[in-house]
Image (cartoon, rainbow, N blue to C red):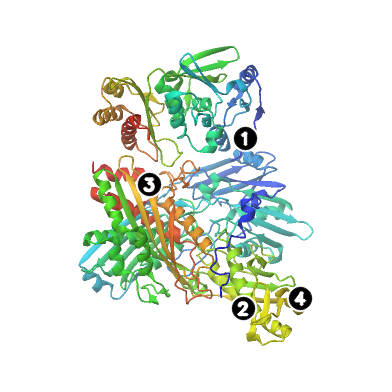
Amino acid sequence: MKPCAFIYHRPSGLPEALALLAAHAPTGGRVLAGGQSLVPMMAYRMAQPSHLIDINHIATLQGAAMQNGALVIGTTTRHAAFKTGICPGPLGAMLGFVSSHIAHGPIRNRGTFGGSLANADPASEWCLVMVTLGGRVMLQHASGTRMVAAGDFFTGVMATALADDEMLTEAHLPWGQGDQWGFYEISRRAGDYALAMCLVVYRLDNGLMRDVRLGIGGAEATPRRLAAAEAILAGQAPTGPNFIQAADAAAAMLKPMTDHNVTALFRRDLVRAAVRRALHHSLNHE
Amino acid sequence: MTGWVGRPITRFEDDALLRGAGHFTADLPAEAYLRFVRSPVAAGIIDGCIAPDGVMMITDTDLASVPPIKPIIRKFGYVPIAQPVLARGVVRYTGEPVAAVIGQTEEQAEDFADLVSLNITPAPVCVTAEAAMAPGAPVIHPGMADNIVVQTALTTPGYESANAKAAHRVVTKIRSHRQAALPMETRAAHAAFDAATGRVTLTCTAQMPHLMHRAITAMLGMAADELRVIAPDFGQKMSLAAEYVVLVWAALRLRTSIAWVEDRRDNLMASFHARDIAIEVEGAFDNEGRFLALRGDITANVGAYAPYPNTAAVEPLMSFTELPGPYDIGEYSCAARGVITNTCCSAPYRGVARPAITLAMERLLDMAAMQLGMEPAEIRRRNLIRIFPHTTPTGLVYDNAAYVETMEMALLAADVPGFRARQHAARARGVYLGLGMSSFCERTGYGSAAFAARGMDIQPGWEHVDMTLDGDGVVTARIGASPHGQGLRTTLAQIIADAVGVVPANVRVVHGDTDHTPFGWGTFASRSLVISGGASLIAARKIRERLLQQAASYLEAADADIDLRDGYASVTGTDRRVSIAVLAQVHGGFADDGFYDPLGTFSNATHIAMVAVDIETCMVRVERFIVAEDAGRLINPMIVDGQIHGGVAQGIANALLEEVIYDETGNILTISLADFLAPTAHEIPAMTILHRETIADATMTGAKGLGEGGTIGAPAAVLNAINDALAPLKVTINEMPATPARLHAALRGTK
């Protein structure tokens, strides 16, 4: 469990980092953000990068700020930075609550928002947040920049639209939906990978749910919103029977993954529970 | 008169560990590092193993003169198995060491290992005991056609007639899935050749340093003086690691220092596993719920090879011998077998087979209680042994104890009626709470006779302690035993301090170094405090007698008037005193020894778990845990509590989380801590621990062993609690770990 040899680079600015990436990506160079997934994979030699480009010392890639109604999150912003509200209002509260489900304290101190997105683990909380809220990611390479919608960015289990020579530098998280949100995650132990999780966001208009966004993570190869469940809730009151109906619809339309811990059948039941509980959580954050 | 025994003094071991100043084998610098090339398949014929140019590789060919590891017992149809230290033409489990490569760093050694071209033609595999026992199954070791390495059976003369009288008959099958011990410090070894003396010093993690010394010198044809073993330790290391033999061979051959540190992947894959056991039990009960007879059928999947010194028989034979547990069962019929499979070898792990047999008995009793319409506690009350000594159907003799009283203590603390009311109210809200109990007794501190009864060639029974009292007033105890974290430096110091009359801080316990300690067996089987403590007490009392004479002479008083305490000899009722240091100086020091080989003693406990089962997500939360235990005299209550805390945590993990999983090809799926789920503080509740002290007649110190009890009782308590929670849904689960997937499968039929 010692990694293969690699050449370590520590650029202090983004252009230098992108130039290094352009130079070394063709021969197996990779970006090192928080390293909480990549480094263990290197220890198991499942990842054998020839060059590591450490972006932790690029000051401009850290921190988050509101711009035009969206929270713009620098790629090396640590999970722990979200704990006490990275921005005011319900968005900050939601991100803080979700962040507490990511692994354990030491990992949250080191792991980064952008690193989680680029790693694209199906059980990543941040990937679910991005897809559910309709976020976008900024992908940069030495000679250009593009914005990609989160829904298009995640293409499979630990697979994304990132080209080898591209770096995810920012995430844009819009928040226009209103202030109701709920989240529920099911895992074997505290801090373990999610077996299923649900994030729901909506606004209440005269007691009825509007602009409902309901996303599922941990159950399929990539997180996704479930339109059928959203449609069931839209225009309805936030009541237990409506929640059950939405949860049943969500569970029915999933094509859950199976592994040696959890069968697809079980995972479907977990999704049902996660959806219903996330919806109840939206009414009571105690 | 208050002494040091019985006080919760802080452990002498902890200061360095808490300051980060502890020493670990992996800290030792070496000139070279070794890495093992391991079989990627569970069974096959080795066609070739080729190292890249310039890489030094060791294979079985180099070790042709080294005999295989082949421990023997001479009973129970045991078929000895030979394990070459590196695979000899055939591989029998995924992870079996085939070759070793040597690099200047650990990284380089791993690079070299990746470059070795290992060609194996796969052969048919048996992963489970059922598959290995099936007609026509592949033969894993030549000469063992049915893959059964050991088997035994017993039916007491009165069994049939007692069984026929049953008013109630209850049958249950339990399954304990495979677990790994998961020591914090994995196996690690550092072998250093000294050109001046021609000796090798092997620093390694091992629970039996002297026996490792004896085994390795014998295998490599070394004189006893040519090897020194230094072995501090965490657990999982009772058995001889083939890897250590290769390392010492390499140090001798290369005349250098060379190290091997097992990584977590190799530890989970190819160190020792445990507890892959299936048990069927049938209880015959009278109308009052009293046992008339017990039948058991035990199958243990013991893996591909036999660990030295215990052999592959330890789990099935322990299950067979100890299944009746703390209950008064006169008539017994049992068959047990150990089955060889293409999996990693099974070896003793804290509790050994007893978590599984306790699960079987405690599930049986709960199911019987339900059938008879009785509270679980009541059926135990009617069956726990009350008269001691008690001889079991397999000939074990239980010494004085208080099984019923221990259980009543636990029940009182649990407030069962209060819990039942909460449980009833919660069920109305769709919340499923459960309470489960388990009672057990634990055979501890047993000497040579117990191992002789197993027919073992090696009978690790007695312990020997060499003791000196020097002119600085310090008592030094050189012990053959070898603690692995249980605080023996502290508890032995307390025993010796009282006996000699010094303070514990002036007792030095030297252990784990074959150059500086007398031969002894090590730490296992909840024996060290009982046996090494007894030997220490014998030696300390001899020194005390001589000190008393010396003090009487020095102080011009009668022996009977001398009080030895906390470093001074004083004449009772006067202010005349002299320090023990001065007495030792006058006498030129004192030296004596103690040797102790007891028959053994049985500690006991009742565990109660309270759980909440989420029937939607199938997650189980242990909300409260109560232990009432009786391990005789408590030498240090704080250390006792610590032993129980750690053991219960391991037991809860066994019940809910930890499982070694193989796929049908014998590939192991749980080779990281993301897959093999160890418990964290989140999963382990605060515990209530209650003590009884039935002073043991059977031991020198009055203490009984307790190192394994937490691990033994906890799984059954948790499983019973889950079953209690799910009783309204008519769901039972008799498998551990009771994972969410297994609970889901059990619950699915009910919705």
The numbered mark at residue B621 is 3
State how far apart marks 1 and 2 are (Cα): 59 Å
Height in image: A283 above or below B162?
above
Mark 2 and mark 4 lie on one chain; the one further toward the N terminus is 2
Residue B96 visible to an observer of this rendering: yes
Q: Are marks 2 and 3 on the same chain?
A: yes
Element type where label 4 sits in the image: helix
Q: Are marks 1 and 2 on the same chain?
A: no
Q: Position of residue A263 (x, y in %)?
A: 35, 38
State how far apart marks 3 and 4 are (Cα): 61 Å
Q: Farthest residue in the right direction? A: B196
Q: Position of residue B453 (x, y in %)?
A: 46, 73
Which chain is home to disc 4?
A: B
- Alpha-carbon neighbours of circle 2 within 10 Å: few (<14), some, or many (≥20)? many
The numbered mark at residue A4 is 1
State how far apart marks 2 and 4 are (Cα): 19 Å
Q: Amino acid at mark 1?
A: Cys
Q: Amino acid at mark 2?
A: Arg
User: Which residue bears the numbered disc 2?
Assistant: B541
Which chain is home to disc 3?
A: B
Quadrant for the N terminus of chain B in the image: bottom right
CB contact under 8 Å: marks 2 and 4? no
Element type where label 1 sits in the image: loop
Q: Looking at this view, is B89 or A204 the one in front?
A: A204
CB contact under 8 Å: marks 1 and 2? no
State how far apart marks 2 and 3 are (Cα): 50 Å
CB contact under 8 Å: marks 3 and 4? no
State how far apart marks 4 and 1 are (Cα): 61 Å
Quarter location, residue A176: top left
Which chain is home to disc 1?
A: A
Instruction: For marks 4 and 1, give the one nearer the viewer.
Output: 4
The numbered mark at residue B585 is 4
